[in-house]
Image (cartoon, rainbow, N blue to C red):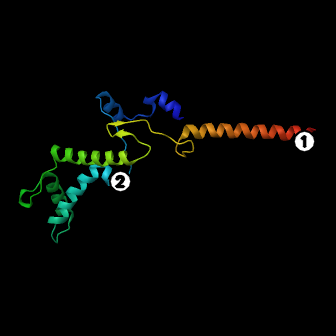
Amino acid sequence: MKADLLANPDTNRNLLQKEFDAHGYQTIYTPPYECETQPIELLWAYVKNYVARVMGDDHSIETVTRLTRQGFNGDQANDHLPVDAELCNRLIKHVHTYLNAFIKEDEELDGSLTNLGDVFVPDDDPMDDEDDEEEADQEQSSDNDSEEEEEEESQE
């Protein structure tokens, strides 16, 4: 299956990935539930921090909605900058720095986020589907050989 996907890369690509490819961008998947690798999580933290800081006793939906919008649009009275391209770029740069440090420390990765080398996949990697298929074929072949040997012995 893995070989087929590699041979036919468009088979498993969604519209966003195809659009990125068409414009020369690369889609990089980051680990889920790892805030430091998700710029959107850092952005939400920035806005939620603002809401928590300025929220008084009124926790109504209307107040939370208003404060969330202020968190995105900025609030000069509370020294809170808006969510703009500059902030987004800073958050993305933070994530790149974090990931590059991770890549540098990882024994199986080489390079940087923008220039990852080939990843060494151990022979016994449980996530490597291609090896799993080969191993299953070898096991089935071995099982068939054993059955044939047993039949020959029982016939003698």
Q: Nearer the viewer, residue 109 or 33?
A: 109
Which residue corresponds to the image point at 14% horizontal and 56% vertical from the top-left?
70
The percent coordinates of residue 38 (x first, y second) are 31, 49
Q: Quadrant of the N terminus?
A: top right
Q: Would you say 36 lies left or right of 64 here?
A: right
Q: Would you say 49 lies left or right of 29 here?
A: left
CA distance separating discs 1 and 2: 59 Å
Q: Is residue 78 above or below residue 12?
A: below
Q: Is residue 136 above or below residue 55?
A: above
The percent coordinates of residue 118 (x first, y second) are 43, 35
The percent coordinates of residue 64 (x first, y second) are 19, 62
- Crowdedness near tag 2: few (<14), some (14–19) or many (≥20) residues, C-alpha within 10 Å: few
Name the N-terminal-most of marks 1 and 2.
2
* Secondary structure state at the residue bearing disc 2: loop
Q: Amino acid at mark 1?
A: Ser
Residue 55 quadrant: bottom left
- Mark number, residue 34: 2
Residue 142 quadrant: top right
Task: Identify the residue position indicated by label 1 in the image.
Answer: 154
As drawn, the residue found furthest toward the right would be 156
